[in-house]
Image (spheres, grey):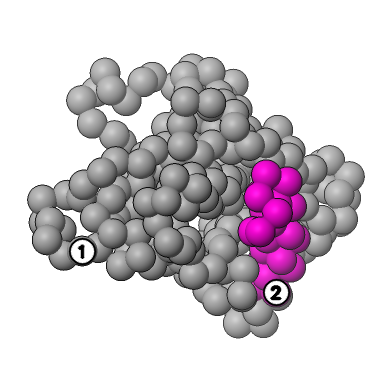
Amino acid sequence: MNRVDGRAPDQLRPVEMRLDAMPYAEGSCQIGMGDTRVICTATIDEGVPKWMKGSGKGWVTAEYAMLPRSSPQRIPREVNRGRPGGRTQEIQRLIGRSLRAITDMNVLGERTIWLDCDVLQADGGTRTASITGAFVALAQAFGKLQDEGLLAASPLIDSVSAISVGIVDGTPVLDLNYAEDSTAQVDMNVVMTGSGKLVEVQGTAEDGVFDRSELDLLLDLGSKGIVELTVLQEETLGASDPEF
């Protein structure tokens, strides 16, 4: 199979992660995966939602948005409709679940971490890039709390990242861009920790069906991509924190 950008079936798009993309935030990372670009920021709020007060536990939550011209056609701002659309709600809940999976809320204490993921440019995989970049922003925010003496230890119990996989023209491929995603027979998102534990798998047969052997191939591809992304996360954070 010849991919539209010349990559091998098991090859990630070029990945960039840049810290301190938003200098006012407690943590921030601009992530690029091919032509998809997302700014992820972490904001620390002292306090938790009402239903958590007195529990001694913290909370991690996320919001996601696509800028109006992040795609070839203008996307209307959802604020003008009064609430996020169904797709947006689904994605921001996925991001929040993924980051809570690797956070010890007891260690965090009664604080809320807001993760804002804003898509600057979309070419497939915006939700997976958001999760991968949001982890970097979250880790940076936790480091700030430790540096200020507000936490004795990091609440992180693992890392987390995400990647898309799919079957395009009968071939299992890693990290789909939009052209591949829009024609894929199977489309799947894999969220996995750095230690190899699954957080979430979202898979759909867009055209027909797929069997267990193909599912296993896709999960193996996703795992390979997660290993590579985890190394890049560690390198990005290690550049600012040698102890990470």
Find disc 1 in the rendering and name its residue.
Answer: 56
Residue 193: x, y in percent?
56, 68
Of label 2 and label 1, which has the lower sequence position? Answer: 1
Q: What range is drawn magenta here?
A: 218-244
By secondary structure, the bulk of the magenta-drawn segment is best described as helix
Quarter containing the C terminus: bottom right
Q: Residue furthest front?
A: 149
Position above or below: 202 against 67: below
Find disc 2 in the rendering and name its residue.
Answer: 220
Residue flagged by tag 2: what amino acid is it? Asp
Camera-side residue: 17 or 172?
A: 17
Depth check, mark 2 against mark 1: the one in front is 1
The number of numbered discs placed on residues in the rendered structure image is: 2
Q: Residue at x 89, y 45 (%)?
A: 6
Q: Is residue 182 left or right of residue 14?
A: left
Residue 224 belongs to the span the image colors magenta: yes
